[in-house]
Image: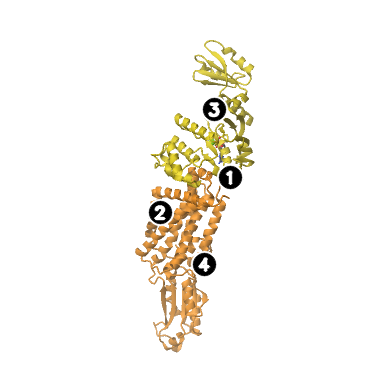
Amino acid sequence: MTGFSLTRVAAVMIKEFKQLTRDRLTYAMMLAVPVVQLLLFGYAINSEPRHLPTALLVQEDSVFARSIVAALKNSAYFDLVAQARSPAELDEMVRRGEVQFAITVPGDFTRRLVRGERAQVLVEADAADPSATGPAVAALAALPSQALARDLKGALAPAVGKAPFEVVVHRRYNPEAITAYNIVPGLLGIILSMTLVMMTALSVTREAERGTMESLLATPVEPIEVMAGKLAPYVAVGLVQTAIILLLARFLFDVPMVGGWLGLSLGVALFIVGSLALGFLMSTVARTQLQAMQMSMFYILPSILLSGFMFPFRGMPAWAQAIGEIVPVTHFLRVVRGALLKGQGTSDMWRELAALLAFACVVTALAMARYRRTLD
Amino acid sequence: MTLAIDVRGLSKSFGDKHVVQDVNLKVEEGRICGFLGPNGSGKTTTLRMLCGLLTPDSGQGTALGLDIIGQANLIKRRTGYMTQRFSLYEDLTIEENLQFSARVHELDRRKERVDKALERLGLLERRRQLAGSLSGGWKQRLALAAATLHEPRLLLLDEPTAGVDPKARRTFWDEIHALSAEGLTVLVSTHYMDEAERCHEIAYISYGRLIARGTADEVIAAAGLVTFNGEGAGIDRLAGEIAALPGVDMAAPFGQSLHVSGTDRAALEAALAPYRRAPFRWEEVQPSLEDVFIRLMETSQDNFR
Ligand SMILES: Nc1ncnc2c1ncn2[C@@H]1O[C@H](COP(=O)(O)OP(=O)(O)OP(=O)(O)O)[C@@H](O)[C@H]1O
Ligand SMILES: [Mg+2]
C-alpha cells in the first residue's frame, strides 16, 4: 500500500541487533549451544536398519550370478531397486544417494569360480552413515558360504572350510565407519533449527508480551519490513553458528570436507532463512513467549528423530520416512552430508535444494498472511 | 473549519462485551479535546480504533481526512500515538528509541531531530541510559517525545500524565498548547479534572457510550446540576447522612466543606432545610466538572442496567 522502505527495514534491523547484543545471556547461549551440543552428540545411537536400497550390476548371465542375486533378495537387509548397465551408472547411483549399496558380479565370476581362482563379488557401501551400513555389511560375510550351497556340488564343491568366493566390501565416503563423520554435519541442521526457530519465534511474541507491539503497530512499518528487519540479525547469527560448527567438525572431529561448497552455501542460506521465517510464523500463532517456546520444541522433536539425524533414514518405517520427508531438516542434512562427505555438486542435490527453497517460500508466505496488522 | 477527527457509529466488542457503542466524535483541527470517562469505559479502545490499531466492528469515519479503515497506514504516518502503558523498548537507550522512531518514519536530518528532542526533554546527558531504567514520569516524557518526533498532524495521547509530577505536567500541557497553536490536533484521555479544564473541549464516555460533549462550561450547564457548598465545623462528617436524603444525588466532602448536588432544585432545597443552622453556612456554587462527571457516571450506570 505504501511501498517497501529500506529505511524502515533498517530501523527494525538495527533495533533488533542492539537488543540482541544487549541480551548477554541469549547472546552467549547462541554461541555456546553449538559447542556443547557438538561435544554431547559426539557419538551416535546405533540401530539396525534393513531394506536398504541396493543397485546391481551383473556382468555375466550365469546360474551362479542368479543364485547370488536370489540370496541377496532373500536377505532382509537389501532391497534391489535398480539394475545398472555400466560401472559408471552404478557409481552415479551411489554418489547421488539413490542407493546405499552397489553390488557388482563381475564378468569373469563363473570362470574364476570354476577354476578356483578367488572369485569376487564387489560391494560398494555408502558408509557416510556407518550405523546404516554396518549391520548389512556384517550380514554379507555369510553370503559366500550360503548363496551357492545348492549349485556347487560334486566336482565343484569347495574344499571343506573354504568359501567358494569372496565378498569385497569397499566403504565409500567414510571408510573407517566413524559415526562422528555423520553426526557432526547432521548436528549443523539440528543446532540451526533449535536456535533460529526459537529466536525469531520469541522475538515477535516478546513484543506482544512486553506491550511494545502496540507502539510498533502504530508506526507505518509494514509486515514484510518487520519480518525482514527481524530476520536479518539472526541470519548473521546462523552464519556464525555454521562457521563454528564446521570449524569444530574439521579440527576437533577431523570430519573430511571434500567439497560441494556451492551447494552447501545455498543449502545453508535457504535453511537459515526458512528456519527464521518458520519462527516468525510460529510467533504469529503463539500469544506468549512460553507458547512460542513450546511450539518450537514441537518442531524440533521430529527434526531430531525423523530427519535421519538420530536414526538412519532408511532404517525407519515407511510412515516415519513419509513424515521425515516433510521435515525441512531432512533435506538440509542430505545437502550437508552430500556436500561435505561426498562432494556432491548442485546438480546432484537440486531436489533437496528445491525442497529447502519451497520450505522458505511457503513459510514466508504463510507468515505474511497470518501476521496481524492490528491488535484485534 | 476542517475536522481532524470525524467518526460516526463506532462500535467494538470483545467477545460478548460491547466495549464501545455507537460513538460519534468530531474534533476540529487545532483543538485539544479531553477524553474522559471511568476506568474500562472504552477510551483506550476508541483511541486504538482511530489510529488503525483495532478494526471497528461497525461505524466509519475519517482521521485527518483519511478513512480510518481503508487508509490506516496513511493515518499512521501523520499521527502520533502515545500508549497508556509504556511501550517503547526498555532494553534500548533513550537515544536509540528516538532513533528508531525517526527511522520508521523515514525522517530526514535524523541526528539533528533526535538531538533536539533530547535537549527539549532535558535528557541530553542521559541519552545512553536504558529506557527501562527511567522513572515512571520520565518514561512518559520520553514516550511523548517519541510520539511527536515525526511532527504529526494528530496526536492521540492515552493518559499521558499518569504518574507525572505537577511541574512536569505543567510543562507537558504548555507544550501541548504550543503544538496545538501550530495546528496540531490533540485527543487526550485523562482522569485529572484540572487537565480536563485545560482542554478546549471535552468528550465524556461511559460504558462505551459518548454521553457528554462540548466545552467544560457547556458540559457543566448541560448536566443541569444544582450544587450547594456547605461549610462549618463537622460538616464533612454529615456526607453520608445527607447523601441518603431524597432529592440529593450526591454529597462529597472537600476538605472542610461539603458539595451537595441534585438535579431537582426544590427537592434539594427541601432536603437541606434542616441543616440551615449554625454552625453551617450554605451557598449555591457553580458545580465543578468533577461533580458533573460523578453524576454522569452514576446516571449512565443506571441507564446501562
Ligand atoms: N483486547 C481486549 N480483549 C478483551 N477485552 C478488552 C480488550 N481490550 C479492552 N478490553 C475491555 O474493554 C473495556 C474497555 O477497555 P479500555 O481499555 O478501552 O478502557 P479505558 O477507558 O481505557 O479504561 P482505563 O481508564 O482504565 O484505561 C474493558 O472492560 C476491558 O476489559
Ligand atoms: Mg485506557
Q: According to the image, label 4 marks what residue?
A: A351
Q: Which residue matches tag 3?
A: B197
What residue do we see at 37% from left, 57% from top?
A35
Can I make out residue A307 in this image? no
Specify the quadrant that holds the N terminus of chain B: top right
Q: Which residue is mark 2?
A: A30
Badge 3 sits on which subunit? B
Which quadrant: the C terminus of chain B?
top right
Q: Is residue A135 above or below residue B64?
A: below
- Distance of mark 3 from mark 4, alpha carbons? 71 Å
Chain for disc number 4 = A
The alpha-carbon separation of the residues under discs 2 and 4 comes to: 30 Å
The residue wearing badge 1 is B72
Determine the CA span between mark 2 and mark 1: 38 Å
> What residue is rendered at 45% in x and 34% in y?
B137
In space, the residues marked 2 and 3 are separated at their CA atoms by 54 Å
Check if mark 2 and mark 3 are on a common chain.
no
Decide: few, some or many residues near mark 3? Use Cα within 10 Å; few <14, some 14-19, many ≥20.
some
Q: Return the x and y of residue A269 as percentages of the image width and height.
A: 47, 60
Front tag of 1 and 4: 1
